[in-house]
Image (spheres, rainbow, N blue to C red):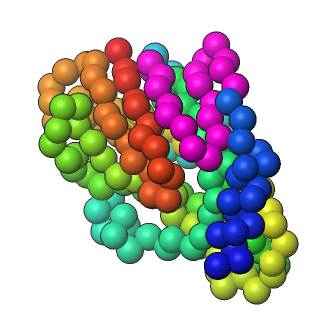
Amino acid sequence: MNRKIICACIGLLIFSTVVSAAGIMIGNRGYINHISTRRDILPDDIAPIILDDDFYQGAPRDHVCFNIVELSLDILTLNIGYSGGCEDHDFALVGPTTFMESNPVQTIIVLSHDDHNDPCDAWLTEELSFDLTPLKELWQQYYQQESGTIIIWLEEFEEPIIYEFY
């Protein structure tokens, strides 16, 4: 309970809306809409989304607070808060290999967080970036089209992320 209260308070303090040329940055409540273009080279600190049904079902889901979410090109950047400080924490963006049929199609993804039973209560913030290209390529394979839209629901984040690509 305390973590949720802390998360809500910090989220309200950090809440901001910043529009950049590359995309729309939002606070802990908001709507993301961005048109993607091709990106061939990724920095080493950007991990691809993992599309694996078994991992998605069993992925660790320790608590995180989403402070800022930004979609730019094919890159989803998450500024998160969580408690810890004594152990290394592992994060991965994970999704299923199927879509929920609607127009446009939808998917639910999760930020997998393994805190390794960290007993410490320091409030930490971190920025993580993930490449959504594998999700786009899965959509292109299923629907045999180059351009489209996917409505992404990120677990524990209340608003949809609209991922458009051309």
Where does residue 27 sit, x and y in percent of width and height?
65, 40
25 in the magenta segment: yes
Question: Viewed as shown, does residue 74 lie left or right of 151?
Answer: right
Residue at x 26%, y 52% (from the top left corner): 97
Q: Is residue 150 magenta?
A: no
The correct choice, above or below, for 53 with respect to 21 in the image is below
Q: What residue sits 84% from the left and 72% below the top?
A: 122
**Res 80 quadrant in image:** bottom right
Between residue 71 and residue 29, name the one nearer to us.
29
Tell me the quarter of the image containing the C terminus. top left
Q: What residue is at 64 percent from the left and 79 percent from the top?
A: 1
Judge left or right: residue 35 versus residue 63.
Answer: left
Q: Which quadrant of the figure has residue 19?
A: top right
Occupied quadrant, residue 75: top right
Between 66 and 166, the one nearer to me in the picture: 66
Relative vertical location of residue 125 with respect to residue 2 in this rendering, above or below: above
Q: Which residue is found at the position 71% from the left and 77% from the top?
A: 2
Number of marks drawn = 0
The magenta stretch is: 18-36
88 sits left or right of 78 in the view = right
Does residue 124 appear in the picture of this structure? Answer: yes
Residue 22, x across and y down, in percent: 61, 18
Residue 46 in view here = no
Q: Position of residue 36 (x, y in %)?
A: 45, 20
- Image coords of residue 10 (percent x, y): 76, 56
